């Protein structure tokens, strides 16, 4: 399971700027911005600090993000829907072909 940090979202909900939160955490603005936008891992000490400053629980800092498996499942579902549409279209074409054939027999 892949997770995404929700630090920026929680920060804005609390009415804090990046600079304010960076100061409270004792880090530079650039360091904080890296954490908010690019960090792929985070230490437990920093999680504790963030939870204290943002008044939240550790679970609030993370959000499940789509994994490759989720994307593959969505892609397969989309392909299955397209296949069903094509099959339905073919059935409709065949139905109209038969209908025209019957109509032409009646007209003769």
Image (spheres, rainbow, N blue to C red):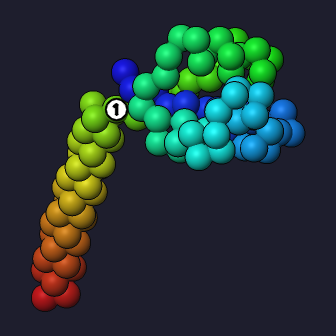
Q: Identify the residue at the far bottom of this view.
A: 108
Secondary element at tag 1: loop
Residue 13 place in picture, x, y as percent? 81, 36
Nearer to me, 1 or 5: 5
Q: Residue furthest right?
A: 15
In which quadrant is the C terminus drawn? bottom left
Residue at 27%, 31% in the rendered image? 69
Q: Is residue 84 left or right of residue 38?
A: left
Residue found 53% across the figure and 11% down from its top = 44
Disc 1 packing (10 Å; few <14; some 14–19; many ≥20): few
Q: Quadrant of residue 9?
A: top right
Residue in the image at 65% along x and 11% along y: 48
Does residue 17 show up? Answer: yes
Residue sitting at x 55%, y 31%: 5
Residue 35 on image: x %, y %: 54, 36
Q: Nearer the viewer, residue 85 or 27?
A: 27
* Residue 105 figure quarter: bottom left
Q: Where does label 1 land, which residue? A: 67
Q: Position of residue 42 (x, y in %)?
A: 49, 22
Point out residue 45 in the picture as x, y percentages from the top left corner. 58, 11
Q: Taking 92 as reference, is 6 left or right?
A: right
Which quadrant, please, contains the N terminus?
top left
Query: Which is nearer the eye, 30 or 87?
Result: 30
């Amino acid at each position: 399971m892949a997770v995404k940090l929700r630090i920026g979202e929680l920060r804005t909900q609390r009415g804090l700027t990046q600079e304010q939160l960076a100061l409270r955490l004792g880090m530079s603005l650039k360091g904080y911005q890296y954490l908010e936008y690019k960090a792929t891992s985070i230490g437990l000490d920093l999680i504790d600090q963030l939870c204290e400053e943002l008044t939240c629980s550790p679970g609030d800092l993370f959000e499940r993000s789509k994994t490759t498996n989720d994307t593959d499942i969505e892609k397969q579902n989309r392909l299955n829907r397209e296949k069903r549409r094509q099959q339905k279209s073919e059935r409709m074409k065949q139905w109209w072909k038969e209908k025209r054939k019957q109509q032409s027999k009646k007209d003769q």
